[in-house]
Amino acid sequence: MVVVANMIMAGMSGSGVADASGTGAVLIPAMKKAGYSTPFAAAIVGAAATIGPIIPPSIPSSSMAPSPTRRSAGFFWQGRFRGS
């Protein structure tokens, strides 16, 4: 569930830090309530949040796209399978 939530968040924000803070605020207390330890819950959310910069529209691909030799559509087209 944590990975799916971070994939959805990554599609909206494209930032790993935003994914970790956004989903962690909700999922870490829920995981603690389910019996997981705090370090384990934080580690799972942190690891799952690393998908944020990979799934488009990511911040690195958006910042590299305006290059005069590259088209921004190409960056999003090349990243279409990374998140699936």
Image (spheres, rainbow, N blue to C red):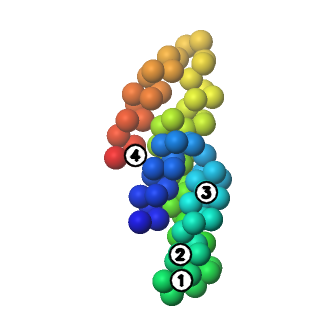
In this view, the residue in front, 50 or 8, is: 8
Q: Quarter of the image holding residue 50?
A: bottom right
Question: Tag count in the figure?
Answer: 4
Q: CA distance from mark 2 to mark 3?
A: 13 Å
Residue density around tag 2, few if under 14, some if 14–19, many if 20 or more, within 10 Å = few
Q: Quarter of the image holding residue 82?
A: top left
Q: CA distance from mark 4 to mark 3?
A: 19 Å
Q: First in sequence, mark 4 or 3: give its number.
A: 3
| Residue 26 visible | yes
Answer yes or no: do the residues labelled 1 and 2 have beta carbons within 8 Å? yes
Q: CA distance from mark 1 to mark 2?
A: 5 Å
What amino acid is at disc 4? Gly
What amino acid is at disc 2? Ala
What amino acid is at disc 1? Lys
What amino acid is at disc 3? Gly
- Residue drawn at (62%, 65%), measured in percent from left and top? 25
Reading the image, the residue beneath label 2 is: 30
Reading the image, the residue beneath label 4 is: 83
In the image, is residue 57 above or below residue 71? below
- Residue drawn at (45%, 29%), measured in percent from left and top? 76
Q: CA distance from mark 4 to mark 2?
A: 25 Å
Q: CA distance from mark 1 to mark 4?
A: 29 Å
Q: Which mark is residue 33?
A: 1
What is the x, y in percent for residue 10? 51, 47
In this view, the residue in front, 69 or 5, is: 5
Reading the image, the residue beneath label 3 is: 22
Q: First in sequence, mark 3 or 1: give its number.
A: 3
Answer yes or no: do the residues labelled 3 and 1 have beta carbons within 8 Å? no
